[in-house]
Amino acid sequence: MEWNIHPFKEEPLKSFFLLTFLFILMFLVFLISRNITFSLIAITAMIVSLRGFLFNTRYKLEAEVIHIKMLSFQYKKKYNDFKKLYIGKDAFLMSPFMFKTKLNKYRGVYIPFPENLKVEIINFISEKFEDVIITER
């Protein structure tokens, strides 16, 4: 099972405000530093940190692993590395902890899915976990 998520295309209003913010930020950095190279480095750092929103991300579910590919980054995670599954309205979170913790943001894997594949993805991924919690946000 495979799908793509590209928030920049899917949410044009947020994309417009983000681009406006980036141009204003570049202008302000240039006004403060008077150095175009420094401004370009600052914008590049912002773009890299926002890569999950700006660029296409491909997810692929296989029998034993999940593949996540974004730009030149590629992750391959085994389902048995995770102990708990949280299913939300438009995404699921695979957690390596048996209990609820704030470390899920850093150690867990958050996977958004498209609305048209929601039931199929939830059924497939739920079979891989013993402890499934459904949290509709």
Image (tube, rainbow, N blue to C red):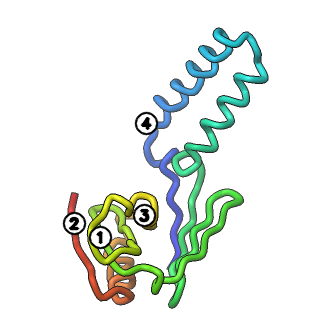
Distance from Cα at disc 1 to Cα at disc 4: 25 Å
Q: Which residue is mark 2?
A: 135
Q: Nearer the viewer, mark 2 or mark 4?
A: 2
Distance from Cα at disc 2 to Cα at disc 4: 25 Å
Distance from Cα at disc 3 to Cα at disc 1: 10 Å
Q: Which residue is mark 1?
A: 87
Residue 101: x and y in percent read 30, 63
Q: Is residue 56 above or below residue 86?
A: above
Q: Secondary structure at mark 3?
A: strand
Instruction: Say which label, 1 or 4, has the lower sequence index.
Output: 4
Residue 52: x and y in percent read 54, 51
Q: Residue at x 68, y 35 (%)?
A: 44
Instruction: Say which label, 2 or 4, has the lower sequence index.
Output: 4
Depth order, front residue of 58/87: 87
Q: Which residue is mark 4?
A: 14
Residue 21: x and y in percent read 51, 25
Q: Is residue 55 above or below residue 115?
A: above
Q: Which residue is mark 3?
A: 110
Q: Residue at x 21, y 63 (%)?
A: 136
Identity, as a three-letter code, of the amino acid under mark 2: Thr
Instruction: Say which label, 3 or 1, has the lower sequence index.
Output: 1
Identity, as a three-letter code, of the amino acid under mark 3: Tyr
